[in-house]
Image: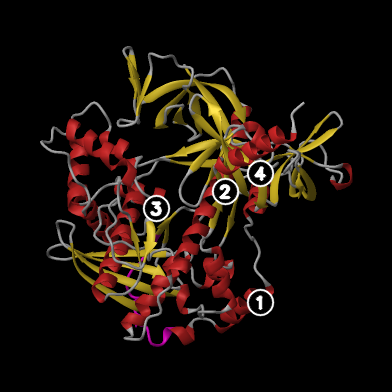
């Protein structure tokens, strides 16, 4: 038995050890596995073991100490929960024996959450639910949740889109106040807005879109000159009708974009505007911002004029009709439109050739249309190839957007979409890759538009066995809305903004307001950086939600197909653990696990490829795969090499 002196010394020793043990505060970051990390404000990161992760939730702010974990490693031990941001979440209800749980549909909340008997709302096994955390796991490691709503059952028609809308908080109806403002606009009509506009209704504009499109926001007309063309691009002008600060304006700002689900559209603006009063409907006078471009024979843009105008579309043409016309079948196009369409196609071809020489072309990908049965489930997936009409419209819109951006930059106003090129942390390896495979004397720099475009054009025409341009494209920054007129390196444009979709995108609507103010020599009101960031975040949410619903529906369809069939695909991404493959016929993406491929296989971060003495897998490579496992509700499919 220790005497008092020894006990005192032991207590003192423990206090000294405790004082010497590093302590921090930080935020929990979960991973796809059971372990996680905790990040401190000064940039440090510490490993959190699976047992410790059971005590916390993703995003928790915690106090922790750092202890040795063997082999020279350290780990965090949670000592106190400071705050928790995890609350409401969505997921699938699971019954296992007497246990009732929710499997969260959440990127990092990757554990089943127990639901106590009194909080189950009669949910059945498999139901899709909304819930909230009612008992935090700290310090005992047992989280609990209460169900707030049963969203629906897996077999319900269109439940996938309904669930994703609820999960992301996407409103699909308009308030009474918004509807009242729209009703007033519709009743008043356009006469009061038309009087002081330039009347361009005599020009034979046409719209070219999908046959089913109703929110038509662009119309085109081209006339041939002795040298080159005049290209007229008419854009729908809802900004003329929507008062800044109105309920309609606030709602459009909050939505930021229309959301295009495979089976439903959530419009940014009410259909009475987006599909009727502001839509460039055939044979209807419509308010339009018209961009008049003088295009030279080489495809360069010599002059830009912008008009507050009134236009009248002469025909609603589909992509297929115009593509057939370009290929020589003129039967479906009225004779009086043949000449303008010929000039339009020639002008678009010149614009494309100029871009090939001076800028960068985007990677072309087919579209995929989901065909639904009467029960709201996918019965077929149809691959839709881009045709000459798609390219004609795309070239016209790109020309319009970059011309408006240059016009704004010259006037020192507006906002822009800037793209800074390669991510900072990847510049070293990208430079080494290009130096080696383009046989350059020195490591290249690509910090200016001219340097970057020149290198990417060399990469496009290189005889390297690697797809250099594709490799670089997987290592780029995201584009950003910016109040500064900076280049868009990804497209190779000196300046770029978007002006052509004000029925569908709030930033385009704001650009219309700015342009109109400048035309009238009025003071311009620019959005602040917070509003631009909010628009960008909401548009990102819209893209993610639409993609999740589409992937879910596609994988449900794939579950019904022959699991033994061999499928053709293309490698679209890789990391050290996986190869991501996109199926050629359906656009479905899945992964191949390479963690057990064998020690002879190596992943090269510079070339983004897996290689061994026997072969190599590179981006863009076509391969054959078979299905290993499909988890449609988790929107995940695993492939195996075939």
41 or 292: nearer the viewer:
41
Q: Position of residue 84 (x, y in %)?
A: 66, 52
How far apart marks 3 and 1 lie (CA) works out to: 44 Å
Left or right of 610 on screen, residue 90:
right
Q: Secondary structure at mark 2?
A: strand
- Label 4 CA crowd tier, 10 Å (few <14, some 14–19, many 20+): some
Up-down: is 541 above or below 484?
above
Of marks 1 and 4, which one's residue comes earlier in the chain? Answer: 4
User: Relative to the observer, which residue lies in front, 366 or 149?
Assistant: 149
Considering only order in the chain, which callout, 3 or 4, is on the residue closer to the N terminus? 4
Q: Circle 1: is it few (<14), some (14-19), or many (20+) Cα within 10 Å?
A: few
Residue 90 pos. (x, y %): 69, 47
Which residue is rendered at x = 19% and y = 31% of the image? 437
Q: Are marks 2 and 1 in contact (CB under 8 Å)?
A: no
**Depth-wise, is mark 1 or mark 4 nearer the camera?**
4
Q: In 3D space, how far apart are the residues under numbered discs 1 and 4 (Cα atoms)?
A: 50 Å
Does residue 44 belong to the magenta stretch? no
Task: Pick whichever, 640 or 192, lies toward us.
Answer: 640
Whether residue 12 is visible to the viewer of this picture, yes or no, is yes
In the figure, 574 relative to 122: above or below? above
The image shows residue 619 at horizontal and vertical percentages of: 35, 30
Residue behind mark 2: 27
- The residue under the point 62% across, 78% down is 183
Q: Which residues are magenta?
A: 194-207
Q: CA distance from mark 2 to mark 1?
A: 41 Å
Label 1 belongs to which residue? 177
Nearest to viewer (mark 2 / mark 3): 2
Which of the labelled discs sits on residue 332, or is there none? 3
Q: Are marks 2 and 3 in contact (CB under 8 Å)?
A: no
**Residue under numbered circle 4:** 79
**Residue 241 percent coordinates (x, y):** 50, 79
Query: Do the residues under discs 3 and 1 have CB atoms within 8 angstroms?
Result: no
């Amino acid at each position: 038995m220790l005497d008092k002196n020894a006990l005192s010394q032991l207590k003192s020793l423990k206090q000294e050890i405790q004082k010497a043990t590093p302590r921090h505060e930080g935020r929990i970051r979960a991973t796809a596995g059971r372990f996680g990390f905790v990040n401190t404000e000064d940039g440090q990161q510490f490993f959190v073991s699976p047992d410790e992760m059971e005590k916390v939730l993703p995003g928790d702010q915690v106090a922790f100490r750092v202890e040795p974990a063997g082999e020279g490693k350290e780990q965090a031990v949670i000592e106190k929960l400071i705050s928790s941001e995890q609350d409401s979440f969505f997921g699938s209800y699971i019954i296992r024996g007497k246990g009732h749980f929710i499997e969260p549909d959440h990127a990092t909340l990757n554990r089943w959450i127990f639901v106590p008997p009194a909080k189950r709302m009669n949910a059945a096994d498999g139901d899709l639910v909304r819930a909230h955390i009612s008992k935090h796991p700290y310090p005992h490691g047992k989280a609990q949740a209460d169900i707030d709503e049963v969203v629906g059952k897996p077999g319900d028609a269109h439940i996938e889109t309904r669930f994703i809308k609820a999960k992301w908080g996407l409103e699909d109806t308009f308030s009474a106040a918004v509807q009242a403002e729209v009703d007033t606009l519709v009743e008043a009509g356009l006469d009061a807005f038309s009087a002081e506009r330039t009347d361009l209704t005599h020009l034979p504009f046409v719209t070219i879109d999908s046959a089913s499109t109703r929110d038509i926001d662009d119309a085109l007309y081209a006339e041939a000159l002795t040298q080159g063309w005049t290209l007229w691009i008419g854009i729908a002008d809802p900004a003329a009708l929507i008062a800044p600060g109105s309920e309609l304006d606030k709602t459009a700002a909050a939505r930021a974009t229309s959301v295009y689900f495979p089976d439903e559209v959530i419009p940014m603006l009410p259909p009475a505007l987006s599909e009727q009063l502001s839509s460039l409907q055939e044979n209807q006078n419509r308010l339009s911002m018209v961009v008049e471009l003088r295009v030279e024979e080489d495809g360069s843009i010599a002059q830009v004029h912008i008009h507050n105008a009134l236009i009248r579309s002469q025909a609603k043409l589909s992509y297929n009709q115009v593509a057939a016309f370009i290929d020589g079948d003129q039967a479906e196009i009225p004779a009086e439109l043949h000449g303008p369409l010929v000039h339009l196609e020639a002008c678009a071809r010149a614009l494309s050739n100029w871009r090939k020489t001076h800028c960068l072309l985007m990677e072309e990908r087919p579209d995929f249309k989901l065909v639904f049965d009467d029960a709201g489930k996918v019965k077929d997936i149809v691959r839709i190839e881009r045709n000459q009409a798609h390219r004609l419209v795309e070239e016209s819109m790109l020309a319009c957007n970059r011309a408006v951006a240059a016009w704004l930059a010259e006037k020192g106003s507006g906002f822009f979409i800037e793209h800074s090129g390669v991510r900072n942390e990847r510049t070293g390896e990208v430079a080494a890759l290009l130096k080696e495979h383009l046989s350059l004397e020195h490591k290249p720099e690509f910090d200016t538009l001219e340097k970057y475009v020149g290198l990417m054009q060399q990469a496009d025409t290189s005889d390297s066995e690697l797809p250099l341009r594709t490799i670089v494209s997987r290592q780029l920054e995201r584009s950003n809305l910016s109040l500064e007129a900076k280049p868009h390196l990804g497209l190779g444009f000196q300046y770029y903004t978007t002006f052509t979709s004000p029925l569908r995108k709030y930033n385009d609507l704001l650009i219309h307001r700015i342009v109109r103010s400048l035309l009238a020599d009025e003071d311009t009101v620019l959005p602040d950086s917070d509003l631009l960031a909010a628009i960008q975040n909401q548009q990102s949410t819209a893209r993610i939600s639409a993609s999740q619903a589409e992937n879910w529906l596609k994988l449900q369809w794939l579950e019904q197909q022959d699991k033994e069939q061999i499928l053709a695909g293309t490698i679209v991404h890789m990391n050290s653990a996986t190869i991501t493959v996109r199926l050629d016929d359906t656009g479905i993406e899945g992964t191949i696990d390479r963690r057990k491929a064998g020690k002879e296989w190596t992943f090269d971060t510079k070339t983004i490829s897996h290689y061994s003495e026997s072969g190599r897998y590179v981006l863009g490579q076509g391969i054959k795969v078979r299905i290993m496992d499909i988890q449609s509700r988790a929107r995940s499919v695993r492939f195996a090499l075939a």
